[in-house]
Image (spheres, rainbow, N blue to C red):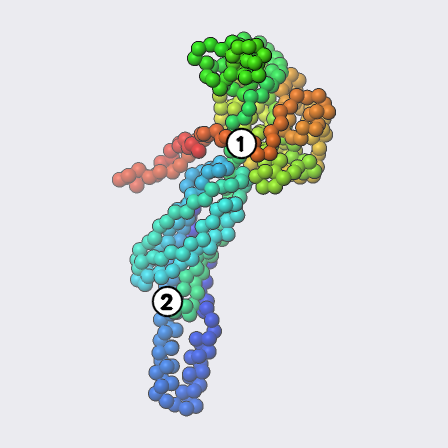
Amino acid sequence: MDNAAGVVRRLRPTSPWPFIAWGALFVTQLVSPDRVWSWLLVGLGALIVVAYLWARQLRDQVSAERRVFGAWVVAGDRLREQWTLTNRGWLPVLWARVRDYSEVPGYRVDRVETAPSTGARTWSTSGVCQRRGVFRLGPWDVEMADPVGFFRVTHHHPEVSTIMVYPRASHLPDLDLPRGRAPGRSTTADRAVEETILVGGLRAYAPGDPLRRIHWKASARHDEFMVREFDREPSGDLWLVLDMDATVQAGAEAEATQEYAVILAASLASQFLRQGERRAVGLLCSGRKPIHLPPGRGQGQLWRILEALALAEPAEGIPLEELLRQSGPTLGAGRTLVLVGLRALLSRQRIPSVSIEQGFPFSPIDKLKRRHTESRALAGFGRVIQVEVEEEV
């Protein structure tokens, strides 16, 4: 982030008293001349001039910049920035206080630093992004002063940028979802080698099967170990329907029902779209800004869903029943809907449901990947090229 443009530099007296004292000494010297008053008048005057010249150098010869590491952040990750304080003058910066007015929860960068004459000081700051959402970085100030504190210098950096904190996808318990129907595509009896969230059936345990696939209740009924099988090719699109009606939400901060709903929707989208599933996933969400994201496949669709979920906020408006009624014709036939909301509505409609209780131990998915383009300089050539980088968090 280039901070040279638009910086407002101010130099102000810290207090009027040094100037009042100098004026009083001047009047006293005129009324009752004495060598003591003369020395005090010259000494204080020289001190004010030196302090002013020092402060003016801090105003004109000192600059600061900040740079954000990484192009994106997921909730629970660290936001990292690098700061540089550069002094082009021949007098040192004895102290410089950085005041940041960013609104990222859990991220504080206020700090006091120094810089040598004709030198620079670089440091890094970091903080855990505790909540998903879109937050402001900036504006920020650098405050400095001369050694005796007669003058205060402020560099105000008004630029503001935004950072999106994506929701963190987590592992969920197995969900036995219906398959739906997809025109022109037949279902398959083949099973997935890797686990998905769609349970396709049960079979007897065979040597080499992972123990985590054992279905203990079914094993007790059959009096032998039974393991889950997972569908590799589900049919029909999957719609994630998120209830963001403020009138039915409860709890606060990380334990709020809307935060659980966002985590669940992000986790479902991640588990279907990251494991090579052929089923397209769409998102329907009520709230402050209703979302209707058509079904899609692949990593690109996953990040579109995560971005939409990062922006989702509750609002009083359309209840879930009305949202489904209005959107029904656009969802199409033969689709699978996963409703993330209060269980009462599902019970009234005799729709199978799974309850995630407060305090559920969400286990974050280890890594998410995303590609972006960075500018990099070629060593020894001074040429800047565009490089596509894949990041993991």
Any mark on residue 147, and which?
A: 2
Q: Nearer the viewer, residue 73 or 329?
A: 73
Q: Quadrant of residue 21?
A: bottom left
SS at mark 1 in the image: loop
Residue at (52, 19) in percent of width and height? 196
Report the mark closest to the observer, 2 or 1.
Answer: 1
Task: Using the image, determine if residue 317 lies above or below residue 85.
Answer: above
Name of the residue lying farthest toward the bottom = 32
Residue 347 against residue 59 in the figure, above or below: above
Quarter where residue 241 is shown: top right
Q: Is residue 365 shown left or right of residue 347?
A: left
Residue 245 in sight from this viewpoint: yes
Q: Residue at x 52, y 24 (%)?
A: 271
Residue at image point 44% right, 86% down: 27
Q: Nearer the viewer, residue 82 or 168?
A: 168
Q: Quadrant of residue 90?
A: bottom left
Q: Residues within 10 Å of mark 1 (few under 14, many from 20)?
A: few
Q: Which residue is mark 1?
A: 361
Nearer the observer, 144 or 160: 144
Instruction: Tell me if I can see residue 303 in this picture.
Output: no
Q: Position of residue 65 (x, y in %)?
A: 40, 50
Q: Secondary structure at mark 2?
A: loop
